Amino acid sequence: MKIRWLGHSAFSISTPNDVNILIDPFIRDNPACPVEVEDLKADIICVTHGHKDHFGDTIEIAQKNAATIICNHEHSVYLSQQELETMGMNMGGTVKADGISFTMVNAFHSSDMDFIDGIGPGGSSCGFIMELENHRKIYHSGDTSVFGDMKTVIRNIYQPQIALLPIGDRYTMGIREASIAASWIEPEVIIPMHYNTFPVIEQDPERFKDLVEKSTDTKVAILQPGETYQE
Ligand code: NI
Ligand code: MN
């Protein structure tokens, strides 16, 4: 399994059976992203919410790859009107695609479809728990504050081994809150995201790593945009 960070909250995951999952593919306008839209392969695209820095190039990539978009109900209604293949869902639900389970979980954040002129309401922001063919579970939290369900619902029900968490502050939790999230979720590995894309979310990931690793058994894998975590 390979998890490649594309900068910000964008990841490309290649599963043990070679299914390509893209999450929050903010590529073209992402100053931290080292790849081109044309270089990406996707069978499935997960979207956590409608803000441009997450929805990104979803439509173009889905069209080029005939990918299925897994997203909230409101986005699904809009995107299926654009002749795109979608699996709309909502909090607490699970869908299965290409042998992978996707569970939609809460995120505390806002969401409108600001990629549409005139802006439409975009349903709720969310996170995803992805269970791969080998039963490893990856939690992508989307944009969120720290919240109590991480300690109960996320940890007790889903028990993800790998967590992708924002540390940028201002629009999401920052380093202090994300280190508390780490102690609540208790994953084996955290890959920090949503930082250093823009000056307003500048953070030192080494500080996060120190804080988490001195207080928990969780390892923090700091990636540079374009780098891959593999297991
Ligand atoms: Ni956002
Ligand atoms: Mn964001």
Image: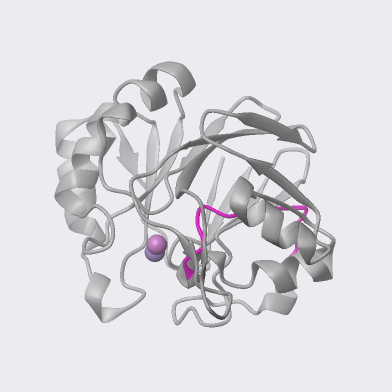
Main SS of the magenta part reads: loop
Q: Quadrant of the C terminus?
A: top right
- 99 sits to left or right of 129: right
| Residue 96 point in image, percent of width and height | 73, 32
Which stretch is magenta? 40-51
- 84 sits to left or right of 13: right
Q: Residue furthest top?
A: 156
Can see residue 37? yes
| Residue 89 point in image, percent of width and height | 63, 39
Can see residue 72? no
Q: To which quarter of the image does residue 31 belong?
A: bottom left
Q: To which quarter of the image does residue 36 belong?
A: bottom right
Residue in front for this viewpoint, 66 or 107 = 107
Q: Residue at x 57, y 81 (%)?
A: 117
Q: Is residue 163 magenta?
A: no
**Residue 129 vertical position relative to residue 39 in the rendered view, above or below:** above
Residue in front for this viewpoint, 108 or 175 = 108
Residue in front for this viewpoint, 92 or 136 = 92
| Residue 45 point in image, percent of width and height | 67, 55
**Residue 207 vertical position relative to residue 126 in the rendered view, above or below:** below
| Residue 5 point in image, percent of width and height | 51, 60
Q: Residue at x 67, y 27 (%)?
A: 134
**Residue 8 vertical position relative to residue 133 in the rendered view, above or below:** below
Q: Residue at x 39, y 43 (%)?
A: 107
